[in-house]
Image (cartoon, grey):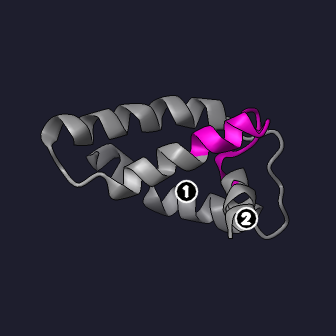
Amino acid sequence: VPISMGMMKPYYDYFAATAPTASYDDPPATMRTYAAALDDVLASFETLGARDDLPRLFVEMTHKGMAEGLENKALTAVIDVLSRDG
């Protein structure tokens, strides 16, 4: 989890650069890659008995995005999933 916390700023910068223009192609890591990492993060929260609302939301949205065919896009493409869910 501390490693994921260290990624907040770089991910924010990437999100700010890609989401406004929907530039989700050719990411440094695909949604599929992030899904595997997020599954591990969620499992750690569950094992520790920690509140897992936020990582669970990330996992659910990532898997939903992959089910919608976004598995090779940037993780920021989940913004499209969220916008459709209202």
Q: Is residue 29 visible?
A: no
Q: Quickly name the residue at label 2.
A: 17
Residue 38 vertical position relative to residue 21 in the rendered view, above or below: above
The magenta region covers: 62-76
Residue 20, percent across and down? 79, 70
Q: Are marks 1 and 2 in contact (CB under 8 Å)?
A: no
Residue 47 vertical position relative to residue 61 in the rendered view, above or below: above
Q: Earlier in the sequence, mark 1 or mark 2?
A: 1
Question: Residue 62 got which mark?
Answer: none
- Circle 1 packing at 10 Å, graded few (<14), some (14-19), many (20+), is some
Q: Is residue 83 left or right of residue 1?
A: right
Question: What residue is shown at x 29% (from left), y 51% (from top)?
Answer: 52
Residue 16, percent across and down? 67, 68
Quarter of the image where one finds residue 38: top left
Question: What residue is shown at x 59% (from left), y 38% (from top)?
Answer: 63
Question: What residue is shown at x 85% (from left), y 66% (from top)?
Answer: 21
Residue 65 belongs to magenta span: yes
Residue 15 belongs to magenta span: no
Q: Is residue 35 left or right of residue 48?
A: right
Q: Is residue 52 visible?
A: yes
Looking at the rendered structure, the kind of residue marked 1 is Tyr
Badge count: 2
Q: Is residue 82 left or right of residue 21?
A: left
Quarter of the image where one finds residue 26: top right
Q: Seen from this angle, which residue lies furthest left?
A: 48
Q: Nearer the viewer, residue 57 or 74?
A: 57
Q: Seen from this angle, which residue lies furthest front?
A: 85
Q: Quickly name the residue at label 1.
A: 11
The CA span between labels 1 and 2 is 10 Å
Residue 64, percent across and down? 64, 43
Question: What residue is shown at x 25% (from left), y 36% (from top)?
Answer: 44
- Circle 2 packing at 10 Å, graded few (<14), some (14-19), many (20+), is few
